[in-house]
Image (spheres, helix red, strand yellow):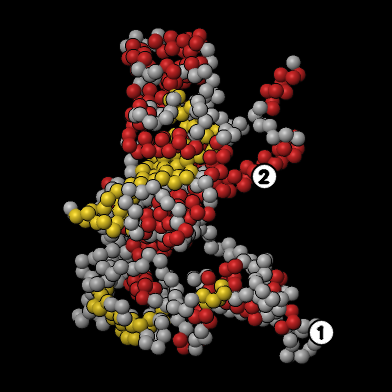
Amino acid sequence: MQIKSDQHVSMMFSYHRSIGTIYSLELCLNLQDIGGSSSSSNNVEGIRNSEAADFVPTRDNSRAPSPSFNAFVPRDQIVGIHEAHPAPSTHVGFDRVPDADIANTSDEDEIEDFTGDEAEVVPETQPLLRDADPPTRVEAEGGGASSSTPAHYLSLNLGAMHSSSVEDRPSSYPLSGEMELEIGLKFLNREIAMLAVKNYNIRRSAEYKVVESDQSRYVCRCKQFGDNCRWMVRVAKTMSSRFWEIRKYEGPYSCLSSSMSQDHGQLDSNVICQHIFPMVHANATICVKVLQGSVESAYGYKVSYKKFWHAKQKAIARIYGNWDESYNQLRRYLNALQAFVPGTIVDLQTRPYYVGNTLDRDSVMFHQVFWSFPSCVEAFRHCKPLVSVDGTHLYGKYAGTLLMGIAQDGNNNILPVAFALVERENTDSWYFFLTNLRRHVATRPGVLLVSDRHVAIKAALEREGCGWEHNVYCVRHIASNFATSFKSKEAKRHLVNAAYSKTQEQSQYYLELISSEDPVTSPHMMEWIRGLEPLKWLQHLDEGRRYGHTTTNLSECINSVLKGTRNLPVCAIVKSTYHRLNELFVLKGWQAQCVEYHQGSASTTCGIPPVEQQQTK
């Protein structure tokens, strides 16, 4: 990078400021003459404007990008959303009951023998060196910033430019290794100081108890203090700066500490979260057992599954936002989408919120939400007149179900066109999703609905006002349900062949094979099959409405479009659908232009070979 003006210096420090994990900055300078002058007082003011666009920042690949961002819309710009009781805050709608290993959702961080340590609430996001000074926008001379320079490179925080003396700079204490604590060691904030003390004790198989803990001091002593050991540490916030400093230290440990084979008291979910954060940031779907192996390798302790589960949720909250606050962010984000992406369809429904038996009129509880993007609505007009629906469970801190509507284009590519977050799969939630899907997306007459034989879906379709005239069953789900009741693989294969048959004769042939397979089980299998409505699963009776589309294709859609989103906070899920579909439409747009350029038309690649084959006959 060439530094040719004061603006470039501001950009450099602003960029360093945006990387919170790098505490110090090293500069390597090579001085050169400007315009052939050897004078040390070269004038750089004359080239400030002309060279401002030469600065091209390099992307930092060590920091994985987050697929989410925050959207804030002024209240006077908010577009109305259907809600039961509009209110300034929205409470979490439903809790997840963890599996058997994590039935108790309370964190194991609170240890009975320790006073005030784990009872402290550590912020989910830990900003470094946060200043009260607002960011100041720096613009190039001559009016406005250079168009080639990203806007965030021109955001200057005056507080970050405060020059600290050498003795005031915080020490870069490693959270791993065998480094000894010492008086005068500084930390950026209280949380980092606590992590340093905990890591020091964990790696020495020693345990301490907290004597004092508040917003200005943190004092710890060895559990055997006074008898066999005098180890203690006192960390306090300095009055002259923003850092925390070790003011008193008696160490190292003089008591005998045997290596523990199982868990460690100070190895709580906050320490684990700090260790696994880069892994979760790179892959939010990473398995808990993989994280367990990493911590066991680093610290030598076996930590419970429940503690790891809580640590992973804290890491996800730091990356994608607080789990509870995500419900309030969801309202703002959807308002922003409707305001700045015209045509976005949103139906957000809430319920009254009660504190005990008293109604809280200032708050409401999230119930369910439906959303679809204008590009999806427009794209469905050019897809086959059918849509398949299904639901999948969320895996995050709070339970819930994601409902999806999926279309198929002329090239047999799947396209998600509508989404809904509901509490669970029941008649009300499916009616809510299907009516919105029919009213806003699948508005053409004669659209076919493909679904499984879920009782709630059948009940919702039978309700007045649902609007679906034609619906069929997914053959894959029928075959799966059949295999659950009957263990005959051969009969299952005949059932699938009967469903795919395009003539009544072929279908009847495979059904007769099932009826004659086994004298004992065949009557029961045929009785089960007769319980299915023929129009709902036999392809030769669908009048061509299926277009050969016999399954919901939900698993393929989740893998390609929504992979890694089902264990995120609700607002992050909605953001992921927006960003990933945006990438999908851009990619498909380029592909369509390439097809039209090379072939002279935008015909589907699936439709060309049969036409050419008929032309050669």
Q: Assess whether mark 1 and mark 2 are in contact (beta carbons under 8 angstroms).
A: no
Q: Nearer the viewer, residue 226 or 483?
A: 483
The residue at 67%/44% (across/down) is 590
For this view, does 369 lie left or right of residue 411? left
Q: How many numbered marks have been drawn onto this rendered protein structure?
A: 2
The residue at 48%/16% (across/down) is 541
Task: Tell me which numbered mark, 2 or 1, is placed earlier along the sequence.
Answer: 1
Q: Which residue is mark 2?
A: 590
The residue at 70%/70% (across/down) is 53
Please say if 576 is above or below 377: below
For this view, does 567 lie left or right of residue 58? left
Q: Nearer the viewer, residue 528 or 446?
A: 446
Residue 85, image x, y percentages:
32, 51
For this view, does 280 lie left or right of residue 8? left
Q: Which residue is mark 1?
A: 36
- What kind of element bears circle 1? loop
The answer to whether residue 133 of the structure is visible from this angle is yes
**Residue type of the residue flagged with mark 1:** Gly
- What kind of element bears circle 2? helix
